[in-house]
């Protein structure tokens, strides 16, 4: 784990409660090292948060007033619209302390919101964090969580401008609101796809789901920051690619791949009133030579948490090989009707059903908590 010189008081990941430790003992033992409860009062915790977040940068636009007042004040350029997205992160659903280093939890909290902005071609402005923390949570876990979140925020010019804190009677809860901006009338929506449009994705799909499966099975022995594992622990929101697609008018519809290709493509089809043909052999996924490669198509179609972009390109436009630093792959075509089909190497079609992440869907929908039985 990399640490900045300014964060020497914080340490690597923590242990988890006993039931989860029994399921992944090796990971849990690696994550130990935090003893004692949360030592800071709410007031001191907010003071620390304010110090770590820093003062808003002076300028005409952006955050004018951040932490320290009853409300933040944001100033957007003339002719721009605000993009606002919110995401809940729940211990036992989106992460496990036995598996996920606290800086990775913080990174993922913000990355989810930034990925939403990328899907509409937006540019980030500010973030708001509300934290509910159990009394026994070590302060060093909180410090490392904030370090991971703020490191990503600084990388993309996002000001942490406010939020709330509370004591949790259960696990950790983080509510993230991210505010972005886009020139008025130019945000890319989910509903613009038409028959004949190409279906495209950035990056490689299924890496995050493959790592999660290794965690569930107690087989993960790598480092969270390694190239192989970073897609799960430290996903990269495709802000540059989303912005470039919007500015070049290349995307007729777009969504970020947070819930799995099959589920997120279904959202575009529903909102656009169209169907889809996906070419199985074209879906960019893990090589079959890798440990999880045997299930690579399943992970790519249904795994989720890729935080890549899924978008459609008008029929008369060519698909770029790369955009905003991200590799682009054409995986299919929008068709008339409302059904989605997966086409194999022999040209045979079979229905492609949404089978990715969905809350309240019982066994089919749970992520980290699935390991609890």
Image (tube, grey):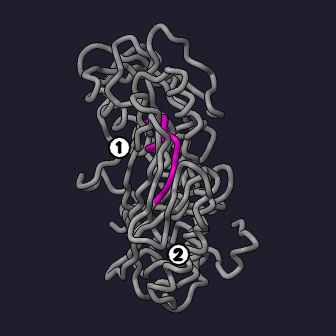
First of labels 2, 1 by sequence position: 2
The one nearer the camera, 24 or 71, is 71
Q: Is residue 351 left or right of residue 246?
A: left
Secondary structure at numbered mark 2: helix
Q: Residues within 10 Å of mark 1 (few under 14, many from 20)?
A: many
Where, by quadrant of the figure, is residue 73 drawn?
A: bottom left
- Indicate whether 69 appears above or below 355: below
Is 207 in the magenta? Answer: no
Which label is found at residue 356?
1
Which percent across, then down, holds residue 362? 24, 55
Residue drawn at 33 percent across, 22 percent down: 341
Residue drawn at 41 percent across, 43 percent down: 82
Q: Is residue 360 left or right of residue 180?
A: left
Q: Is residue 91 in sight in this rendering?
A: no
Which percent across, then down, holds residue 190? 35, 30
Which residues make up the magenta segment?
A: 116-127
Which label is found at residue 79?
none
Which percent across, then down, holds residue 68? 48, 73
The one nearer the camera, 274 or 29, is 274
Q: Quadrant of the N terminus?
A: bottom right
Q: Is residue 220 in sight in this rendering?
A: yes
Q: CA distance from mark 2 to mark 1?
A: 28 Å
The residue beneath circle 2 is: 25
Q: Nearer the viewer, mark 2 or mark 1?
A: 1
Residue drawn at 41 percent across, 87 percent down: 135
Q: Residues within 10 Å of mark 2 (few under 14, many from 20)?
A: some
Secondary structure at numbered mark 1: loop
Residue at the extreme top of the image, as rendered: 316
Q: Quadrant of the C terminus?
A: bottom left
Do tag 2 and tag 1 residues touch (Cβ < 8 Å)?
A: no
């Amino acid at each position: 784990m990399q640490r900045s010189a300014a964060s020497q008081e914080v340490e690597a990941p923590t242990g988890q409660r006993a039931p989860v430790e029994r399921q992944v003992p090796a990971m849990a033992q690696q994550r130990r090292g935090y003893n004692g409860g949360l030592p800071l009062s709410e007031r001191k915790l907010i003071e620390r948060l304010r110090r770590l977040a820093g003062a808003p940068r002076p300028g005409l636009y952006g955050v004018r007033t951040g932490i320290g007042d009853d409300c933040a004040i944001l100033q957007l350029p003339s002719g721009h619209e605000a993009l606002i997205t919110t995401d809940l992160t729940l211990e036992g659903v989106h992460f496990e302390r036995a598996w996920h280093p606290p800086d990775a939890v913080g990174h993922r909290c913000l990355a989810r919101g930034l990925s939403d902005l990328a899907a509409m071609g937006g540019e980030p402005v500010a973030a708001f964090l509300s934290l509910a923390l159990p009394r026994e949570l070590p302060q060093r876990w909180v410090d490392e969580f904030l370090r991971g979140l703020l490191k990503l925020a600084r990388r993309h010019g996002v000001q942490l401008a406010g939020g709330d804190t509370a004591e949790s009677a259960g696990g950790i809860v983080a509510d993230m609101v991210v505010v972005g901006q886009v020139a008025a009338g130019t945000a890319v929506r989910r509903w613009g796809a038409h028959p004949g449009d190409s279906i495209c994705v950035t990056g490689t799909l299924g890496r995050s789901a493959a790592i999660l499966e290794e965690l569930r099975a107690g087989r993960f022995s790598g480092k969270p920051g390694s190239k192989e594992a970073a897609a799960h622990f430290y996903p990269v929101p495709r802000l540059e690619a989303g912005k470039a697609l919007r500015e070049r008018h290349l995307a007729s519809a777009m969504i970020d791949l947070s819930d799995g290709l099959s589920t997120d493509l279904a959202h575009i089809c529903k909102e656009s009133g169209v169907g889809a043909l996906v070419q199985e052999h074209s879906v960019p996924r893990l090589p079959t030579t890798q440990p999880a490669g045997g299930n690579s198509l399943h992970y790519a179609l249904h795994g989720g948490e890729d935080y890549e972009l899924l978008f459609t390109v008008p029929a008369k436009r060519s698909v770029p090989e790369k955009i905003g630093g991200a590799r682009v792959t054409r995986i299919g075509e929008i068709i008339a009707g409302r059904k989605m089909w997966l086409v194999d190497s022999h040209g045979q079609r079979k229905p492609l059903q949404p089978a990715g992440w969905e809350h309240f869907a019982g066994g089919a929908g749970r992520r980290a908590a699935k390991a609890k039985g």
